Image (spheres, rainbow, N blue to C red):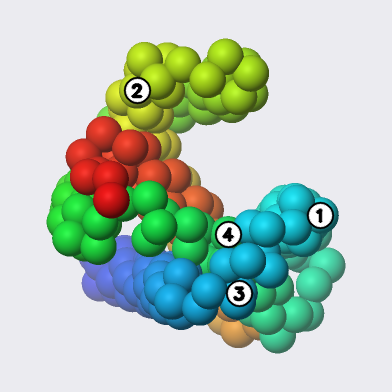
Amino acid sequence: MMQQTVPFQNTQAQVRVNSFIRSVYNWMAIGLALTGGTAFYVSSSTALLQLIFGNRIIFFGLIIVELALVFTISARVNKLQPATATALYTLYAVLNGVTLSVIFLIYTKASITSTFFVCAATFISCSIYGMTTKRDLTSMGNFMMMGLFGIIIATIVNIFLQSSGMQMIISYIGVIVFVGLTAYDTQKLKAMALSQPAGLDAGVVRKGAILGALTLYLDFINLFLMLLRILGNRD
């Protein structure tokens, strides 16, 4: 009896993992599609570009709202209703598309497209590694988080220095950091899925999927932007 029960339990656990991870990637893909579509639409409207980037109050207001949304979803997802968490994630993806629309004015569409596919291939490879490796990536993830804080500090400093060389160094380091974080975050999501008890409320699972989607979405977007600075051709 035990020999039959254990494989069955393992199969059930794997089904839960596959279902959860599939939901995470579906929501991440929806977020990326909303961001890309919004960015392209805004970049095609002179009036919207002037409204957003011609007024610093509006632009920085959008940035503040985005940061508030990320904080709210990350820190308070357990207290939110599933529909609310989904709406906030969707809103964040749209607003991020608004602020990222400027890349269509800086880089050629061809280089944006090619960089996106390079980023997607890199992201998928890292996710597969994070999902399949038996190595514990916690220590690497902690190291990459320290690298992320270093990038943030260096970026703030470079706002004043305006050094193209420093920006390129930040971009190369950023690629390494977000490659590592993608693998680490994927492994964390797998562990989260394995720890979920059978019969968990669907709303709780949805909120976990939204939080996971936001995490991987941020990894993808930041990796894309770092690669674009390296590979992108300017107009």
Between residue 50 and residue 189, name the one nearer to us: 50
Disc 1 to disc 4: CB gap under 8 Å = no
Bin the neighbour count of mark 2 within 10 Å (Cα to Cα): few under 14, some 14-19, many 20 and up. some
Q: Mark 4 vs mark 3: give the one in front.
A: 3
Disc 3 to disc 2: CB gap under 8 Å = no
Residue 56's place in the image compared with 18, above or below, is above
Identity of the amino acid at label 1? Ile
Disc 3 to disc 1: CB gap under 8 Å = no
Residue positioned 57% across, 14% down in the render: 161
Residue annotated with mark 1: 57
Identity of the amino acid at label 2? Met
Marks 3 and 1, Cα distance to the nearest angstrom?
Answer: 14 Å
Disc 2 to disc 1: CB gap under 8 Å = no
Mark 1 / mark 4, whichever is N-terminal = 1
Mark 4 / mark 3, whichever is N-terminal = 3
211 left or right, relative to 115? right
Mark 3 / mark 2, whichever is N-terminal = 3
Residue annotated with mark 4: 99
Residue positioned 28% across, 45% down in the render: 234
Q: Mark 2 vs mark 1: give the one in front.
A: 1
Identity of the amino acid at label 3? Leu
Residue 37's place in the image compared with 215, above or below, is below
Q: Check disc 4 and report its element: helix, strand or loop.
A: helix
Mark 2 / mark 1, whichever is N-terminal = 1
Marks 2 and 1, Cα distance to the nearest angstrom?
Answer: 28 Å
Q: Where, by quadrant of the figure, is residue 194 drawn?
A: bottom left
Q: Where, by quadrant of the figure, is residue 165 drawn?
A: top left
Residue annotated with mark 3: 48
